[in-house]
Image (tube, rainbow, N blue to C red):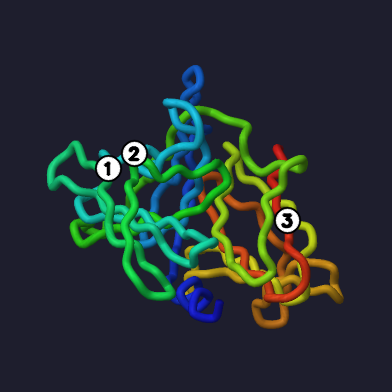
Amino acid sequence: MKKLLSIVICASAVAAYGTDPDPVTLGTVGVTKVANCTTTNTIIAVSFADLAGGDITASNIVKTTNLTYGDTLKVYDAANGNFKVFTLDGEEPPHFWRETLTQNLGGGETSENPGTTTLGAGVGLWLVRGGAWDGSPFDIYLYGAVTASYPQSGSAESIAADTAKLFGNPLQSDAMPVITGQRDGDRIIIATNNVSGTLVYTWKEANNAWGSGFGAKRKTLSAIPKGTGFWYAPNGSGAARTLYWAAP
């Protein structure tokens, strides 16, 4: 757990949020734009189902035409404590995702096929720019079949008391996650554009509220921008927490 959280906080997974038009929906096809990204690591959200039906595959989540050779997708597998890593191959378009050795936090090496690795709406993952990226601002496009199959009040996502989990906003607008069962010291870690690279909210049972310290000031939890995500890091004690997304 400590090793994981050091990776979470030190990796500086920063998403840049710009003003962009509402998502485009053509029939059952949806597109979400995460605009003006400027950093190597961006936490993105699984917002759609697969166009072929069912949960979307890792190979189909992100539009690749404005990405470059060597970019990677990292999917955190909380059950096994590792990151499944997929690398963008093909020096010239059309690029394609290929399997890469999984980063097992506990040691050992495996690999996963991006074409058979599926992710449900509400999952978060990292898009990491590779050495071919020239450092200029870029947009990320997430696409797929429009779906209502995301964690909702009737089917909330469970968070084990001793396991951090990566979530993504599955809605087509900025939205607040609804969390129950949180304990004193639980943390929500959100990517930002400030110098530190992360904004950490901590649950304070005495205040019955999330707070984030900036000097003497305290700040309440903000909505999660569409197409982006956050880490939930429980304090390691008590029963499982639950999380769902309230439709606007």
Is label 1 in contact with label 3 (beta carbons under 8 Å)?
no
Q: CA distance from mark 3 to mark 2?
A: 31 Å
User: Which is more N-terminal, label 3 or label 1?
Assistant: 1
Q: Nearer the viewer, residue 18 or 240?
A: 240
x and y, in percent, of residue 38 in the image: 36, 58
Is label 1 in contact with label 2 (beta carbons under 8 Å)?
yes
Q: Is residue 219 above or below residue 172?
A: below
Please tell me how crowded label 1 is: few (under 14), some (14-19), or many (20+) other residues with Cα within 10 Å. Answer: few
**Comparing marks 1 and 2, which lies closer to the viewer?**
2
- Answer whether residue 56 is visible to the viewer in this image: yes
**Residue drawn at 72 percent across, 82 percent down:** 216
Q: Amino acid at mark 1?
A: Asn
Q: Is residue 77 above or below residue 10?
A: above
**Residue drawn at 48 percent across, 27 percent down:** 53
**Quarter of the image with the C terminus in it:** top right
Circle 3 is placed at which residue position? 242
> In the image as oriented, which residue stretches furthest toward the left?
92
Question: Along the horizontal axis of the image, is 20 left or right of 154?
Answer: left
Question: Along the horizontal axis of the image, is 128 left or right of 51?
Answer: left
Helix, strand, or loop for circle 2?
loop
**Quarter of the image with the N terminus in it:** bottom right
Circle 1 is placed at which residue position? 66
**Residue drawn at 54 percent across, 59 percent down:** 166
Q: CA distance from mark 1 to mark 2?
A: 7 Å
> In the image as oriented, which residue stretches furthest toward the top?
27
Say which quarter of the image contains residue 167: bottom right
Q: Amino acid at mark 2?
A: Lys
Helix, strand, or loop for circle 1?
loop
Circle 2 is placed at which residue position? 63
